[in-house]
Image (cartoon, helix red, strand yellow):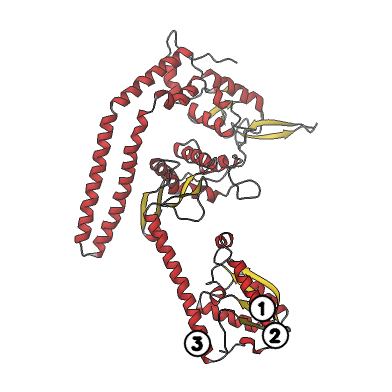
Amino acid sequence: MRFDHGPQHNVTQAVIYCRVSSKAQVKRGDGLRSQETRCREYARYRGYIVKDVFKDDLTGRRADRPGLMSMLAFLRSDRRNPHVVIVDDLSRFARNVRVHFDLRHAIADAGGILESPSVELRDDADGELHEYILASVSQHQSRKNAEQTINRLQARIMNGYYTHSRPPLGYRYKKVPDSGHVLVRNEPLATIAQEALEGFASGKFDTQVEVKRFLESQPAWPKDLPDGQIRQQRVYEMLKRVTYAGYVEAPKWGITLRKGHHEGLISLQTYERIQDRLNGGTRVPARKNLSLDFPLRGFVACADCGKPLTACWSTSRTKKKHPYYLCFGRTCPSRRKSIPRDKLEGDFEALFKSLRPTRKLVTMVSEMFRKAWDMRHAHFEAMQALARRELASLESQIEQLVDRMAETKSSTAFSAFERRLEKLEHNKLIAAERLAGNVETHRPFDEMFELALAFLSNPWKLWASERLEDKRTALKLAFQGRLEYHREDGVRTAKTTLPFNILGGLQMPNFEMARRTR
């Protein structure tokens, strides 16, 4: 293999190539600028005229770097006037032996001549060997650096630290003495993420699509599509991320789930409920027609055929738009017979207001709940003891399993023990969190049930909210399934949820539900 080297040529024009390994190095250091300065000094010393500078912020193991490709295109475009290609060091040129010599050939074919202020490239047997050695050393250093980086990352994850360069939405990195960069809450994104995750776990958001719609309604939440929407895959990845529960893991490196040093936005139990829901098939196509214009769309059904009513805006001859609900059932006698939105939602609002119990009834139920809460306190110590026994049993099983793993000589048995150990460790984490979570029962009754009692005393307030999520939540909390509506007779008998059924069952001379008004 032969290349033109050294200053024996008459070429007077040059280009400079600089490279660092990542965009982070561009921001943190002055690597590109220092490389360019050194190359320009070399060009001045050799009497070269620098025509252009090309830069990359990618690994040297790749040959398809944008800056490098632009440099080769530049050389080919002016092949009649050969250029010297100056690189600060051969390690900046390539970090792989094959890539190094492939690029050397490409530069030579384009009429370029490679030079470096760090090493003299000679066109003889010794020079060729020297270049091979330097390229091999550069490749070795690159692989060694990668191995050391992976080892450091693995050790840090094993110690409970999140290691990705970009923190999950809802977190930011904070430098902590003796701990390095640790995830901390990043408001208001942390609260938004928490509401989305807990809402999906509790059923407030029935599907991933509703989570997506909720996040899109938050101005502070970053959108990844130009029309202000979020990719469904981003929502799925968020729901699958155990980091939000305060834990870390790296299955590809064999690092099992462990408690992290950062605060979780949700509990591990909540995370498990999310995974159960995901595995249960709650991922459905998006409905783009649900909005504040028609909050009852999909919730109210046609009384004639039982199919959900749809809704639309209709334009009159005077170009004025009017909102309607209507049924599109093929065999329905009410097919395409529109119902004015004000009429349907007005009847529904009257029904909602009729659910409001009297103040005396709410007070009585509140006292019943308070007594039940006090009874829960009485059993708290027993619950704690039970949780401690469960945790001790798991620790004992783990200890016995580790002993058996140390004694076994069968690789098959060892693999089975390893899988069992991973499952026990996972259950231990959940049991430990459940034990710690029992302290929630010590919180005051008013703090725990304030919102629930406020909703029971006047569910209309939540429905009157300007947020679509609040309206849909009020529907789910108050009614079982869809309400049937007849375009002439109005709302059919509604099936309310258990709390309102109980309130209705407690009717007494002085305790009754408010009468419905039409």
Residue 297 got which mark? none
The residue pinned by badge 1 equals 43
Q: Nearer the viewer, mark 1 or mark 3?
A: 1
Please name the residue shown 23% across and 39% down the image.
389
Q: Which badge, 1 or 3, is on the more N-terminal residue? A: 1
Q: Nearer the viewer, mark 1 or mark 2?
A: 1
The residue pinned by badge 3 equals 129
Looking at the picture, which amino acid does disc 3 mark?
A: Leu
**How many residues crowd around disc 1 within 10 Å: few (fewer than 14), some, or many (20 or more)?**
many
Q: Quadrant of residue 312?
A: top right
Residue 57: where, in percent of width, then height? 58, 66
Looking at the picture, which amino acid does disc 2 mark?
A: Val
In-image side of 493 versus 74 (left or right): left
Q: Is residue 157 above or below residue 126?
A: above
Q: CA distance from mark 3 to mark 2?
A: 25 Å
Q: CA distance from mark 1 to mark 3?
A: 26 Å
Q: Secondary structure at mark 2?
A: loop
Q: CA distance from mark 1 to mark 2?
A: 12 Å
Q: Which badge, 3 or 2, is on the more N-terminal residue? A: 2
Q: Is residue 280 visible?
A: no
Q: Is residue 343 above or below residue 175?
A: above
Please name the residue shown 45% across and 41% down the image.
265
* Quadrant showing the C terminus: top right
Q: Secondary structure at mark 1?
A: helix
Looking at the picture, which amino acid does disc 1 mark?
A: Ala
The residue pinned by badge 2 equals 11
Residue 42: where, in percent of width, then height? 64, 78
Tell which of 336 and 186 is nearer to you.
Answer: 186
Q: Which badge, 1 or 2, is on the more N-terminal residue? A: 2
Tell which of 300 and 381 is nearer to you.
Answer: 381
Q: Do tag 1 and tag 3 residues touch (Cβ < 8 Å)?
A: no
* Quadrant showing the N terminus: bottom right
